[in-house]
Amino acid sequence: MDTLEVKNLHVAVDDEDGHQEILKGVNLTMHTGEIHAIMGPNGTGKSTLSETIMGNPKYEVGEGDILLNGKSILDWPVDKRARAGLFLAMQYPAEIAGVTNAEFMRAAINARRDDDHQISVREFIKKLDDKMALLDMPEEMAERYLNQGFSGGEKKRNEILQLLMIEPPFAILDEIDSGLDIDAMKVVAKGVNAMRGPNFGTLIITHYQRLLNYIVPDVVHIMMDGRIVKSGDAALAETLEKEGYVGLRDELGLDVPLTDDTDIPSGKGEA
Amino acid sequence: MAFGPKQLDGAALAAAYADLDHSAWLTAQRQRAAEAYSEAPWPEFAKVSYHAWPLFGTGTAAGVTYPDGLPTSAGVIVRSLLTATDADLAPFKDYLFKQTGPTDRLTAFHIAHLNSGVLIQIPDHFHSDQPVVLNTRLLAGQNAHHHVLVVVGSDAQVTIVDRYTGEDGAASADSVVTEIVVGENSQVNFANVDAFGSNITAFIRRHATVAANGVLNWTAGVLNDGNMLADTSTDLVGTGSTADVKVVALATGKQTQGLNTRVTNIGRQTTANILQHGVILEKAALIFNGIGHIVKGARGADAQQENRVLMLSRAAHGYANPILLIDENDVKAGHAASVGRVDASQMYYLMSRGLTKDVAQRLVIRGFLGAVLTAIPLPTVQQELIDTIERKLIHGQTVAHQQN
Ligand SMILES: Nc1ncnc2c1ncn2[C@@H]1O[C@H](COP(=O)(O)OP(=O)(O)OP(=O)(O)O)[C@@H](O)[C@H]1O
Ligand SMILES: [Mg+2]
């Protein structure tokens, strides 16, 4: 069993308004075999958390630690973290002209293997065919340039295809359901469920409880204003769907401005 | 011999080559070039100061070999320039030194000192799936002044691959000048790959003319390691003629590569496309001058160009310099140019899947060069180019790591 721990994580970015703290002490522990979900209002720091775990150099860790199997990975560059077992399905994947999808995935698989055990073309094609069939992807997507001109939905599917090809121990899926029609969402859920098992753990970031009907999580976390404010089982997502973030905030007595705050003036000591 | 001799002694040169030349006409051409030399201007390569380069090597012995011999193809005439007699030269005389006459100092020196060359004639109506492949190896320590003429008749369709490698070893100053004639209604796919070592300083000039409704698809791979100038020019003479010129260049070490890629629209309804993609490593400099010239009377002409340079090190120098000269009103013209670095978000994305920085960088670069590489007509040549680029990139990355 592998373990990923986030301890008291504080993260800032530098933008035109100066140094801005986005994560203000996040704590989270997950193991392979578990499915976690994170929900939370826009701009609350969910993507910041995923990018920081993955090692995006734009984000600066001020305090706290990230540990993979007990070892701090904060000093590791993104590629080392990836080879150690982390995967991030990104909210906005990059487009790369001139590099085919297939050639990229083969390079990604081989990056995890030593020179004497590179995947054979035959084995690779077989695996690719299987996974693409599972995700209802047309064969020619393999020979297209990486994400170049892909529709929003195609990009999401392609992120899941990479997940299935690479088979990492831990995957963070950042809004893998956004912009998907209902059938596509089911296909993506089918892909993730195919990975489910004792050697795979995932952190699913979503705004919609609906995805969690298809991929039922073991733990649901609610994130607000840079912290995890509540954790619970799958039922928590349903409560949230009904009551919204305002209800939860007031129940917890938090001082957090929310976009649907119309009748409550945001100020100190509202609770 | 920096800056070259002030003048050339035509009579002495004629005497020196009289035994080698099998044609009196050729010897007379040398003499004419030698006489033009002292007054001829330096060829213009904007932003490249090459005057102190050792470009003026001499020697009567051939500076090249042909590892696979000269190409043979049914119906195609192939001659070696120096052993051609006046009679052998008959089909070529109307074209030889016509596009690349002794009008600049380096070409004049080249003609005066020619020590090897190949003449190829593709007849009218020629059609073949088999490419004509000419492999040429520049010898170490032996200055080559090598001239190639390819004359393609009318209504023909042909793929020609002109490939240069070099022998490592002693230094030499070489010139390679190529003339290409595309006849009416002919389609010519011409690919040249120049890949020789740092021991060779080179002046490379290739010039094509395209007759009415002719199509020239030109791909050039510029992968030399030494200082070099390469002028790749096309005149669209005939009505409705087209040139599509794609150049890929890789500059490494401390070398300077200066490239002029030019298309001149002369005839009406002519279409020109230039695409140049280059990558610079280490302390190298790469200059792309893209020159689109539409002359008066070329009504309905279209001249487009794109010049892009990627720099992989802080010490690299890159220029992408589009030059548009338009002397006619009823035309279309456009250009795009950029000099930049590898996109950080692309690198992050690739590395987030476990690719090392070096592998990710090579993949992004290969993608960047792909637009030109995929246009190379012969898969084996294409693969060879990809392999050479890969090898040079790995070498450049290794050097960069050692310096850090
Ligand atoms: N690179 C950056 N530069 C400047 N600000 C940033 C950067 N990344 C994130 N932020 C800011 O940090 C805050 C949190 O952003 P983040 O993308 O983590 O939110 P999120 O919870 O994923 O939101 P959403 O649900 O809309 O995807 C936002 O205010 C955002 O503008
Ligand atoms: Mg987000």
Image: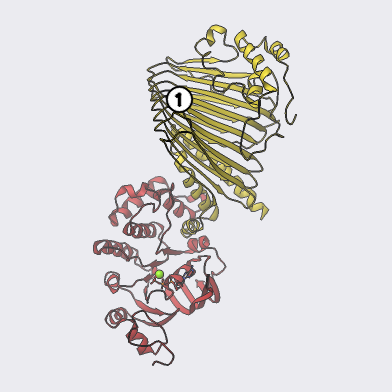
Quadrant in which the N terminus of chain A is drawn: bottom left
**Could you say which is closer to the camera, residue A187 or residue B116?**
B116
**Could you say which is closer to the camera, residue B334 or residue B78?**
B334
Q: Is residue B279 left or right of residue A239?
A: right
- Give the letter of the chain under mark 1: B
Indicate the position of residue A234 as horizontal and vertical percent values: 31, 78
Residue at (62% x, 37% y) in the render: B225
Query: Which image quadrant is residue B223 in?
Result: top right
Ligand 2: quadrant of the figure:
bottom left
The answer to whether residue B23 is seen in the rendering is: no
Q: Is residue A70 left or right of residue A203?
A: right
Q: Amino acid at mark 1?
A: Val
Indicate the position of residue B172 as horizontal and vertical percent values: 69, 29
Q: Looking at the image, is A148 positioned above or below residue B246?
A: below
Chain ID for yellow? B
Query: Which image quadrant is residue B26 in?
Result: top right
Indicate the position of residue B199 as horizontal and vertical percent values: 67, 33
Q: Which secondary structure, mark 1?
A: loop
Q: Residue furthest front?
A: B329
What residue would you read off at disc 1? Answer: B237
Q: Is residue A107 left or right of residue B391?
A: left
Chain ID for red? A
Cβ at disc 1 under 8 Å from ligand 1: no
**Could you say which is closer to the camera, residue B194 or residue B390?**
B194
